[in-house]
Amino acid sequence: MHRLGVLLFPVAIFAFGIEHLLFARAAADAMFPWVLGAPAWNVTFGVLLVALSIGIGTKTRSPLAARVLGATLFVYALLLYVPRIAAHVRAPGPWTRIFGVGSPLAAAAELLAMSGAAWVLAGSGVEGRPRVPSRMGRLLFAGPLVVFGLQHLLYRGFLSTLVPSWVPGPFFFTEVVGAAFLAAAAAIATNKAVRPAALLLGTMFGLIVLTLHVPRVVAAAGSLDEWNSAFVALAMTGGAFVVADASKESASWLPTRKGES
């Protein structure tokens, strides 16, 4: 799963970088996520994402590239979305403005989850010292899963309409996905059964990409939103597999009982 995670995750980041280059002159919020509306910045950020994704994918200074990517996405989430979230908190209106699907909190959660996956990747495979980036990244990856899970439970009416028509019980299916997010978040955050939880999470995300996002992209190939949603899900697929693989490595740092080797 390490190879699959290290392949899918940088591919999604690479796609986001290309989008920034192709749509550098897009107005603010015209390109979800992360666009600021300043062409020069969008080009700079796009080049950075492309370079970091290539560094991770080709293992050219991969730990360094992953660290830079994790820090960049984390800072970007804080600078771009925390002010928007704060503004929505103060504004009168329904809670969906801050917590609903497509809200600033949802977008920030996606960025933070990808930041966490990058930090996990940065800390994995480093011999001889505790993997602090992996532990921090694991928590950053787990937190947004709570947001995704609660959204699926609170807004299951809307999200069930996105379930393919051939899937029986879309309402129940949406609730199951929400519960799966919450269970995976608990397992990853508490470092209990991380590997099976992350493997199942990555498999679920992968199936969502294939059954939900690919058909929607094919049906609306000109929609940038559909492409972005698909690549976010692809990044989460790869990120989950990266977390699963890193959990196998982190077991070597657990204290052993007397008599065990």
Image (cartoon, rainbow, N blue to C red):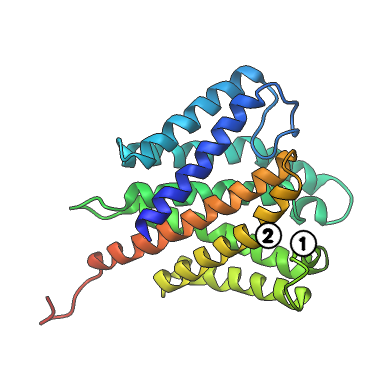
The residue that appears at 46% across and 66% down in the rendered structure is 198
Circle 2 residues within 10 Å: few <14, some 14–19, many ≥20:
some
Horizontal side, residue 208 vs residue 174: left or right:
left
Residue marked by disc 1 = 162
Q: Nearer the viewer, residue 186 or 201?
A: 201
- Helix, strand, or loop for circle 1? helix
Image quarter where the N terminus lies is bottom left
Horizontal side, residue 141 vs residue 122: left or right:
right
Going by the numbered disc 2, the residue's amino acid type is: Leu
**Distance between mark 1 and mark 2 Cα atoms:** 8 Å
The picture quadrant where one finds residue 168 is bottom right
Rendering coords of residue 156 (x, y %): 78, 68
* Up-down relation of residue 11 to residue 96 (above or below): above
The residue that appears at 77% across and 63% down in the rendered structure is 159
Rendering coords of residue 67 (x, y %): 39, 40
Q: Nearer the viewer, residue 151 or 139?
A: 151
Question: Tags 1 and 2 in contact by the CB under 8 Å rule?
Answer: yes
Residue marked by disc 2 = 212
Q: Earlier in the sequence, mark 1 or mark 2?
A: 1
